[in-house]
Amino acid sequence: MIITMKKTANHAEIDKIMTTFKNQGLQVHESIGENYRIFGLVGDTSKVDPKRLEANPLVEDVVRVSSPYKKVSRMFHPEDTIVEVNGIKIGGKEKIVVIGGPCSVEGEDMVVNIAKEVKDAGACMLRGGAYKPRTSPYAFQGMGTDGILALAEARKQTGLPIVTELMSADKLDEFIEHVDIIQIGARNMQNFELLKAVGRTKKPILLKRGLANTIEEWLMSAEYILAEGNPNVILCERGIRTFEKYTRNTLDLSVVPIIKKKTHLPIIIDPSHATGDWELVEPASLAAIAAGADGLIIEVHDQPECAWSDGAQSLKPKHFKELIKKCSKIANVIGRDM
């Protein structure tokens, strides 16, 4: 339930009303703007009578939220959330961010070299998998801690914040120490204990949509993180599984305006995993920017034919540089910058 108080209401009067709700076991969350004060009630609000509340001369409006997610909902939090990572802002009307790097970290020299190339191309963050969820148990599973340390060295040499995937809560301390954005991959989108664990940190979380999950299920996963106290969530659409075989997944770009309407969280697009084909990454990226995405996360490798994983969908640095130049033109058309 969302309660909008009148501007004439003073703090003492508001506190008295909100204390009543807290005594009923409800969580009360406040959002303050220049011209409004909004309170969100989370919990069993079935016994709260909206009509009785509206009769209070201090109350402007009461809305019962029908969606199962509350903290993620734009109804309670009308302003865009902006997630800041080492001075880089993601969301709102800020610049569109581009994250580039290899699917898998294959060694320190390799990831440092690619980090320098993606930075030169215009990327503002570095991605790279140190722990890799793979369909086959015999496929390369990542370098683990050595991969994390290699990414940290790349950050030291380039200044690029690093984004990498966490697969289990037992590695969380390592990620808190070394990683700038913790990625929760598609396969772990509904690993609720893992979501709770990252929710208890203040680290920015990049939450990918599951292989075959609805938007509501995705937002409920984000709700788990926010419910634990971490507001720094970035949503990532990476394509969903359909019957189509010409692409690795089906990129759902309609999700961008839907997310913008229903939530306050920033959203970025992963055209690499969505298409599975490096030749499709550029047009998918241009379309994502036009649709209003807040950023892109793209796989880049200097020798895709020799990549230890996902070479077919990885751009060479020169193609990555060209892509950013083209995306900048689309961004300018819609009034944003890269």
Image (cartoon, rainbow, N blue to C red):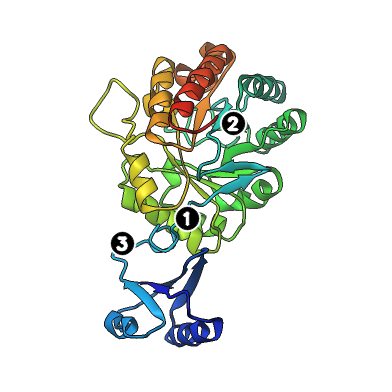
Whichever of labels 1 and 3 marks the residue nearer the N terminus, that label is 3
In percent of width and height, residue 185 lies at 47, 41
Q: Tell me: residue 282, above or below residue 83.
A: above
* In-image side of 47 versus 107 (left or right): left
Label 2 – label 3 distance at C-alpha? 35 Å
In percent of width and height, residue 179 lies at 66, 43
Dot 2 crowding, Cα within 10 Å, few <14, some 14–19, many 20+? many
**Quick one: SS at disc 1?**
loop
Q: Which residue in the protein does label 2 denote?
A: 128
Q: Closer to us: mark 1 or mark 3?
A: 1
Q: Tell me: residue 315, above or below residue 253.
A: above
Question: Residue at the location (38% across, 43% down)?
Answer: 210
Q: Which residue in the protein does label 1 denote?
A: 79
Whichever of labels 2 and 3 marks the residue nearer the N terminus, that label is 3
Residue 274 figure quarter = top left
Q: Which residue in the protein does label 3 denote?
A: 67
The amino acid type, in three-letter code, at marker 3 is: Ser
**Quick one: SS at disc 3?**
loop
Q: Closer to us: mark 2 or mark 3?
A: 3
Q: Do the numbered discs 2 and 3 sit on residues whose CB atoms are within 8 Å?
A: no
